[in-house]
Amino acid sequence: MTNNGVLVDIKHLSKLFPMGAGMFQRSKVFVHAVSDVSLRIRQGESVGLVGESGCGKTTTGKLLTRLLDPTAGSIDFQTKDGPVDIATLRGKAMKRFRRRVQMIFQDPYESLNPRLTINDTVAEPLNVQGIGSLVEREDRVVQLLESVGLTPAHSFLFRYPHELSGGQRQRVAIARALVVNPNFVVADEPTSMLDVSVRTSVMQLMGKLADEFNVTYLYITHDIAVARYMSDRLAVMYLGKIVELGDTEEVLHHPLHPYTKALLSAVPVPDPLHKRNPVVIKGQVSKPVNPLPRCRFYERCPLADKFCETHDHPPLEDHGSGHYVACYHV
Amino acid sequence: MSMTDNILEVKNLTMHYKTRKGPVYAVDDVSFVVRRGESIGLVGESGCGKTSIALSLMKLLPDNAEIKAGEIHINGVDIVPLSERALRDIRWKQISMVFQAAMNSLNPVYTVEDQIKEAMHYHLPRMSDEEMNSKIDNLFRMAGLDPAMKSQYPHQYSGGMRQRAVVAMALSCDPNIVIADEPTTALDVIVQDGLLKKMRELQRQLNMSMIYISHDIAVIAEVSERVGVMYAGKMVEFSTTVNIFHHPMHPYTMALMSAFPSIVGEKTELVVLPGEPPDLLDPPPGCRFHPRCPYATSICKEKEPEFREYEEGHFVACWHPGGEQA
Amino acid sequence: MASATIQPVRVTRSALWRMRLELFWRGLKTNWALFSENPIGLIGLGIILFFGLLAILHPILMHTVWSPNIYDPVSGFDMQVPISPSPPSLRHLLGTDPLGRDVLSQLMYSTRYEFGLGILSAVITVVIATTVGAFSAYYGGIIDMFFMRLADLVIMVPLIPILIVLAAFNPVGMIELGVVIGLLSGFGGTTIVIKSQGLAVKVKPYIEAARIAGGGDFHIIFSHMVPNLMPLSLLYMMFVVTGAIFSEAVLSFFGLTQIKMSWGLMINTTQVFGYLLRFDTWYLLIPASLAITLLCAAFYFVGRALDEVVNPRLRQR
C-alpha cells in the first residue's frame, strides 16, 4: 500500500479505561478497549468494522471522531495541506476539523434532541461552525433534507423528532452528518434499530449519498450481513484488536482467523435449507482487563498451542492481496 | 387433524389497546394452529402485533388492552373467558414464556434459584423441597448452565447465561407450549447460536411446542418448522418455513425476503420496500398492505382479502397471491 | 456551498419567528391537554387563580369602594366599630383585627406579597439549580464535588431554624426572605435533583452529536442540556413556592420579619393579643391560616400535575 489515496491512517491506536480509580488514587487496572490498532482507510472506500459487543468497535469510532482522546497512537487525516494528526488537535483547529469528520449514531430516538426542531438539528453544525449566512444555511438544510428523501423538505423543517418515524429520524441524522460536507463519516450501527423494510432503504440511501457527497465511511456494526452490503473491506475486531482485515467478499468466503470463522458460522442464514458449519470455539467474550501478553483469542481458540501461549499477540500480517490476519496458525 | 394434535388453536383473535387517541387494533382477526411438538415462528416488524399475540396467549395483558373477539384453545380449553384463578392452572404449567429482555424478567434482588422456586411454589404447591431442588438442578443442566450457579444473583450472570436461566425458569413447570419473544435479540451472534441450539434441542427432547417471535427472519428460518408472517396486526401468510422462504405468496413476505441481507450465497441486490408500516390508529382501508404493494389494484383498496388456504397448508391473505394479476 | 441544483424553498424564512411562536403555542396546547386531564392539577390551578383574583382586586377596591382610612390593611381604623376585634359584619366581611383593621383587606393585600415572595424565590432557585446542576453534571470532577458537598451542607442545615437565626440578627423583609429561600433551595436539594437528571441527559447521543458538530461546552450546556432540564426545573419551581410561603408564615408568626403585612403576621397579631386559642375569634385565625394552607397546597397540586406532564412514565397511559 502506498500513502496514495489514504484518507485516514490509524497507527498503533490504543485506548485504555482505568477501572476502580478514585479521586485521589490512580488505577493500576485498565480495560484495554482498543489496543494497538492500525488501519488505513482509503479515500472513497467504505470499511466495515464488525465484532461482538465489547470488542472495542464503538470506542474506535469515538476515537476517530475525537469524542474520546486516545491513550496512545496517532490518527493521520489527509487534508489539502498534508496529513494532520487528529489525536493532537486542540481548540480552533479541532473545531474546524469537525467539519471533515462526522458521525451517524445507532439510536435515532436518542441521537436527536427532543426539544429541537428538525431545522435546528440539521442546521446545528452550520450554526456552530458559523458557515454561511442565515439564508444560505436555511437553503442548505432544505437541500440536505431533500437529498435524504424527506420531501417536501419544508414540511419537515418545523417538526419535532417525536413526530417522525424511526426511519425518518435516521434520515434526519444522516442529513445532519452530511450538512457540512464531511470527507469521512463514522456510522455506528446506523440501521440496527430499524425494521427490515425501512433498513434497506436507509442502507441504500447511505450508499447513494457516499457517491453524491464523496464520503468515506467507517461502518461499525455487529450485523455482518448488513456490513456485507455496506462495506468494500471488512475489519473483524476481537477484544480491542483487529484480527482480520480484507475485501468483504474475500473475508466472508475465505475467513482465515479462527475467530472470524466462528463468527461467520454463527450468523443465522435466512434460508431454512442452508446448513451452517458448527461453531467450534468455547467459552464467551471476557473483558480485556490487563490482558496477558499473548493472543487475545487464546482462551477460546481451537488452534491454541504452546507457541500461542508464550508469544505476544500475533501481528496483523498480509496473507496475499490485502487479506490481513493476526494469527500464528494461518 | 384431530383435536389432540393441535395443542394450541387461535381462532379469529382480535385484541386492542385503548389509548388517548382511540383504539389500536394490535391484533386483528388472527387464526393459526400449533401442533404438539412443533415450533412455529411469528415474524414481522415492530408494531405488527406479534408480541401482543404472545401476551394474549399468556393472558398477561396490560390494563388498557382487551381481547375483543376470538378464541384461544389450549389443549382444547378456551382460555379467553377464564378467570385469573383458573388461569393459574394453565399459565406456566401448560404455556409459559421467555421474555424479550432477560434482565427485566429476572428480579435483581433475588437469587435465580429463589425466583424459579417462587414460580414453582405458586404453580406446583404440592412439590416437596428436595424434589424442587433436584428439579432445578436438572433444569439448569438442561439449559446448559452449571447447577452450582443457581444460588447466584442475576447480575453475576452474563447476558447469554441470564437468557438460559430464563429458559430454565420457563420450563420449570413442564409446559406443553413455550413462547419465546425475541429470546436472542440482545445477544451477540455466537451466544445467540448457542442458545438457539439449546432451545431446539430441548424442544425435541421434551416434545414441546415452541412459538418463536422475532423480527429477524434469519433466526426464524433456523428454528421454526412453520412460519406466520404478520403485518399491521394481521396475519398475512402462514405456511411451512421452506414455503415461506422459497415460495412466498404474499407480496409483503416476498418483499421481506428480498430485503433481508445474508452472508452466504451470491450478493444479490437488496430490494427496497417503499413507505413505512401504517399507523394502527388509522389503518388503510381494504388490505392493510396496499399502499406499499407493487401489485395493488382497486379491489385491494376496497375489500379486505380473506385469509385463505391457497395450497395445501399455505394460507395467504391477499387478492393477488404470488403477485399474479387478477 | 455545494451544488445549488435544488430550488431553495423560501416559504419559511419570512416568518421564522412566527413559526417558532406557533410551535410554542402548539406545545403549550398539548401540555395543557395533558395537564387538564388531572383533576388535582385543575383544582390547584383554580385556587391559584382565585388568589390571583384577590390580589388584583385589592388595589381596585381600595380605590373605589373601600376608603383608605378605614380599610387600609396596616393603618386603617373604623370609628364605627366600637370594640375590636369585631366579628364579621356587612361592613367588614371577615371582621376586624385587635387593632381595628379589616381582616379581608389584610388577607387580600398580603396575597400579592405571598405571590411575589414565592415567585421570586422560585425563580432564583430555578436559575441557580439549573445552571449549577447542568455544569456539575457536564463537567463532573472537582466542580461537581464542590457543589454537591455544598448541597449536602445546605440540606443538612434545616431551613426554618437557619432563617430564624438569620432573622434574629437582622430582621428580614419580603425580598430578602425570597432571596435567602431561593439561594438555600437553589444550592440545596433542587440542585441535586437537576444534576441527576443532567447526568442522564449528558450521556445521550445528541450531546455527542453536538460535540461532533463542533459545539463547545457552553453551547452544549445551554442549547442541549438546559432545555432538557427546564421541565423538571419548572416542576421544582412549584414546590419551592410552597416552601417559601410556608417559611414566611412561620417566621412572621414568630415576629422575626420586617414585613408590614402578611398572612403569617396576621396570625402573629392574633397570638400577640392573646386571641390565638379562642373559638369565638375564629375570624382572626381561620382566614389567614386557610389561605396559607390552600395556596401552599395549590402550588403543590399543580406541581404534582406538572410532574405527570413532564414524566410520561407517571401517566396513566
Image (cartoon, coloured by chain):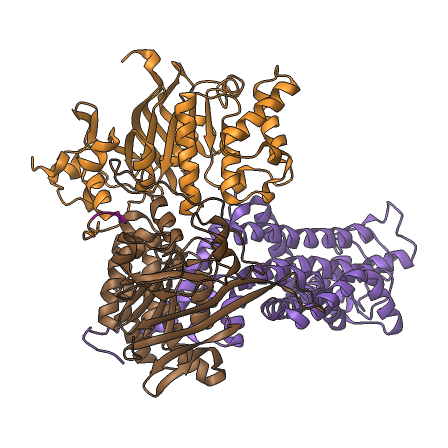
- Quadrant where the N terminus of chain A sits is bottom left
- Furthest residue to the right? C274
Q: Which residue is drawn at 62% across and 34% down?
A: B148
- Residue A202 in view here: no
On the image, which quarter does residue A235 sit in? Answer: bottom left
Q: Is residue B214 left or right of residue C276?
A: left
- Quadrant where the C terminus of chain A sits is bottom left
In the picture, which chain is orange?
B
- Furthest residue to the bottom? A81
Chain C color in figure: purple
Q: In this orientation, which residue lies closer to the viewer: A128 or B245? A: B245
Q: In this orientation, which residue lies closer to the viewer: A260 or A166? A: A260
Q: Is residue C45 magenta?
A: no
Residue B49, position as x, y percentages in the image? 35, 36
| Vertical placement of residue B212 versus C249, above or below | above
Q: In this orientation, which residue lies closer to the viewer: B118 or B172? A: B172
Q: In this view, does A18 lie to the left or right of A24?
A: left
Residue A261, position as x, y percentages in the image? 35, 50
Q: Which residue is drawn at 39% across and 51% down?
A: A258
Q: In this view, does C202 lie to the left or right of C12?
A: right
In the picture, which chain is brown?
A
Residue A190, position as x, y percentages in the image? 36, 58
Over which residues does the magenta segment extend? B260-265
Q: Which residue is drawn at 77% across and 52% down?
A: C289
- Residue B196 in view here: yes
Q: In this orientation, which residue lies closer to the viewer: C193 or B159? A: B159
Give the prevailing secondary structure in the magenta stretch: loop
